[in-house]
Each structure stands twice: as structure tokens, then as C-alpha cells.
Image (spheres, grey):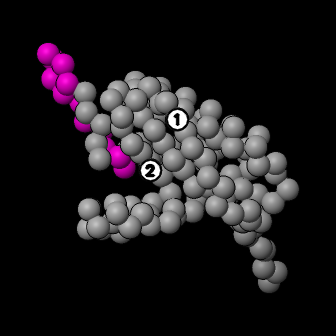
Amino acid sequence: MEISNHNSKGGLVISEDAISTIVTNAAGDVDGVVGFSNRPADVVSTIKKGSLKVTRPVRVVQEGDDIDISLYINIAVGKKIQPVAEEVQKAVKEAVQNMTSKLVSKVNVIIASVEEPQNEAEPTEIEE
């Protein structure tokens, strides 16, 4: 799927992958989001597209001039689900609208799991 905009000066096409990247970057910056989860495969879409690519964590649908976004996230243990989801909705909507100049009518946030945050390994010093 691509989002298209044509006028007398020319055309603009924004790929779904570009919007998905904007969405994951914006959602990943929200405190409490520890990762993303692949969404369950939609059998009808898989048959129509002939690919398992539809199982990515972000789904973008264009309806007229509006964009609907669905996003599967994993949140950190101990975080309240509703405030994290609302912050993700706000961050994703603002980021996509600012970068594409398209109206985002919906941001559906689906909590796929609750996980312990992954701590990055700190380098250890070796005594000689």
C-alpha cells in the first residue's frame, strides 16, 4: 500500500514501510514501550497479497485522505496500560501528521504482551 497525493505540480508517494518506520520510531520513544510484536496473520490479506509480509507490527490503511494505523506493542512490567497506550496514540498521530501532512484519523494500539525491559549489557572491566 502506498499513500499518494497528486496535484498540478506533480505527485508524492509515501510507502507503507516509510510510515511504519515513523510509527515505530515515535512509539519506541514512549516510556513503557519495550518493543513491538508481529500481529497475527490475516488469512484473507495473506492470500490476496501472496506474502507473509502482512504480519509486521504496524498496519496502515488509507481511507480517502485519512490514515488509520494499528500497532502491536509490548509494554514494560509495572507500567499502567492505559496511560502508555494513550501516549503512544498521541506520539504516533503527531509524528505521522507532521512528517506526511496527512490526517491520521485513528491509531489503534494493541497490547501484545507485558515484558521485563531488556537491560543493555554494561561492559565489564577485566583485571590484569
As drawn, the label of residue 10 is none
Q: Which residues are magenta?
A: 6-17
Q: Which residue is mark 1?
A: 106
Q: Which residue is mark 2?
A: 59
Sequence-first tag of 2 and 1: 2
Give the residue displayed 61% in from the left and 52% down from the top. Answer: 110
- Specify the amino acid type for callout 1: Lys
- Specify the quadrant of the image occupied by residue 42: bottom left
Dot 1, crowdedness within 10 Å: few (<14), some or many (≥20)? some
Asked if the stretch drawn in magenta spans residue 11, the answer is yes
Q: Residue furthest top?
A: 8
- Specify the quadrant of the image occupied by residue 119: bottom right
Determine whether the residue tagged by mark 2 lies in a helix, strand or loop. Answer: strand
Q: Position of residue 123 (x, y in %)?
A: 73, 70
Q: What predominant SS class does the magenta segment belong to? A: strand
56 lies above or below 20: below
Compared across the picture, whether 25 is left or right of 32 comes to: left
What separation in Å lies between label 2 and label 1 (alpha carbons)? 11 Å
Q: Residue furthest front?
A: 44
- Specify the amino acid type for callout 2: Arg
Give the residue displayed 51% in from the left and 62% down from the top. Answer: 39
Q: Position of residue 101 (x, y in %)?
A: 40, 24
Split into 4 quadrants, where in the image is the C terminus? bottom right
Compared across the picture, whether 97 is left or right of 82 comes to: left
Compared across the picture, whether 80 is left or right of 109 comes to: right
Depth check: 125 or 66 in front?
Answer: 66
Q: Position of residue 81 (x, y in %)?
A: 76, 49
What number of labels is visible?
2
Say whether residue 35 is visible. no
Give the residue displayed 82% in from the left and 48% down from the top. Answer: 80
Determine whether the residue tagged by mark 1 lies in a helix, strand or loop. Answer: strand
